[in-house]
Image (tube, coloured by chain):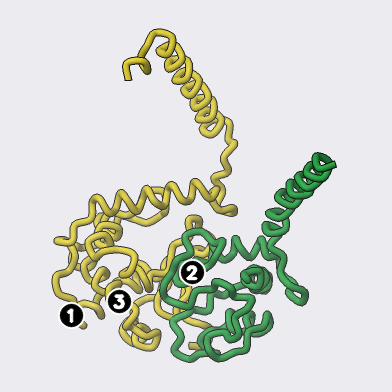
Amino acid sequence: MGKVFSKPLLFGWLAGLATVGVVGGVFALLVMFGGVYDTSATKPHLKIVAWAVHHTMISAVGRRADDAQAPKAITPPMVAAGARVYQARCAACHGAPGMARADWARAMLPTPPFLLDARARWTPGALYKIVHDGVKMTAMPAWGEVESAQHIAQVVAFLQAMPKVSPEAYRRITAGVQPPAGSGFPAGR
Amino acid sequence: MPLGLSRRTGFAATVAALALPLVACGARAPAGVAGDAAAGQVAVTRMACGSCHVIPGAEEADGRVGPPLTGFAKRQMIAGVLANSPANLERYLRAPDAVVPGNVMPDQHLSDKQLRDITAYLFTLN
């Protein structure tokens, strides 16, 4: 290993580092001030950018998730309460069983996902973390700023139970909760 | 002569190697499907179809709610009810609940163009 740091090679290392620095710097300037990367929400991210930011989020949430914050026991009243909070706060962007997202939510990129298999993708602690603290650059709000810990726990309980809630049951449970503007069931229902 | 042959073979192989991905990327839907498959691929991402379905070529489309759409062009049935055809797919996407009452799959209020484009894309999945 001594040879790697010999004098002639040291020059090579420094030249390489400088090249990487200059090329990286020019690239960063082009992106930040040259406007070469398209940030409009009409075209999806480059595949590698989408992959990188998505996995950054998954890892960040996983590292900070704490199952102790998730609801201990999930009861039917908790699920029903969670469904009503979900209808008021979440359904416009994320849809619900049998329910589409609002038209403006469909115009967002990254697009807000439907959450029927959220329980298969995330631990309860991770779901609590995402709902409570939001996600930068995705338009997911930090609901902990405006909602009680109890309501957030109820939503997490509902997310655990969502595959068992039929569209019919969801409509019944959330009857009377103001549906978010622009979203809703198929016409005539 | 052997050299000439190998050169020609090499040239042909190079052309084929360059052309094949082009053909594959063109993602052309079969005759009778009017939509723009490339636009359909973007629409599939935008409509979050991948939250519930595994869809080759769509970003993060690894959902485990509905059936995987892998090899959709050769699927025989849609939702276990309709024979698979571009017309029936559009009919189903327009009103999943009318085809299968109680369906959790929502009517996403797709425009006519989105319906055609998404159909075109799904019919490129062999």
On the picture, is A136 further left or further right than B111?
left
Give the chain letter at badge 3. A
Disc ID at residue A83: 3
What hue represents chain B?
green
Which circle, 2 or 1, is nearer the viewer? 2
Residue A185 placement (x, y as % from top left): 47, 81
Label 2 sits on residue: B54
Amino acid bearing label 1? Thr
Residue B24 placement (x, y as % from top left): 68, 59
Identify the residue at horizontal 59%, vertical 81% (top origin).
B75
Nearest to N terminus: mark 1 or mark 3:
1
Amino acid bearing label 3? Ala
The image quadrant of residue A175 is bottom left
Residue A38 placement (x, y as % from top left): 58, 43
Task: Classify 10 Å Cα crowding around label 2: few (below 14), some (14-19), many (20 and above).
Answer: many
Task: Classify 10 Å Cα crowding around label 1: few (below 14), some (14-19), many (20 and above).
Answer: some
Give the chain letter at badge 1. A
Label 1 sits on residue: A75
Identify the residue at horizontal 19%, vertical 65% (top origin).
A70
Identify the residue at horizontal 37%, vertical 18% (top origin).
A4
On the picture, is A115 further left or further right than A187?
left
Same chain, labels 1 and 3: yes
On the picture, is A108 further left or further right than B22?
left
Amino acid bearing label 2? Val
Give the chain coloured yellow: A
Which circle, 2 or 3, is nearer the viewer? 2
Provide the secondary structure element on which disc 2 rests.
loop
Q: CA distance from mark 2 to mark 1?
A: 31 Å
Provide the secondary structure element on which disc 3 rests.
helix
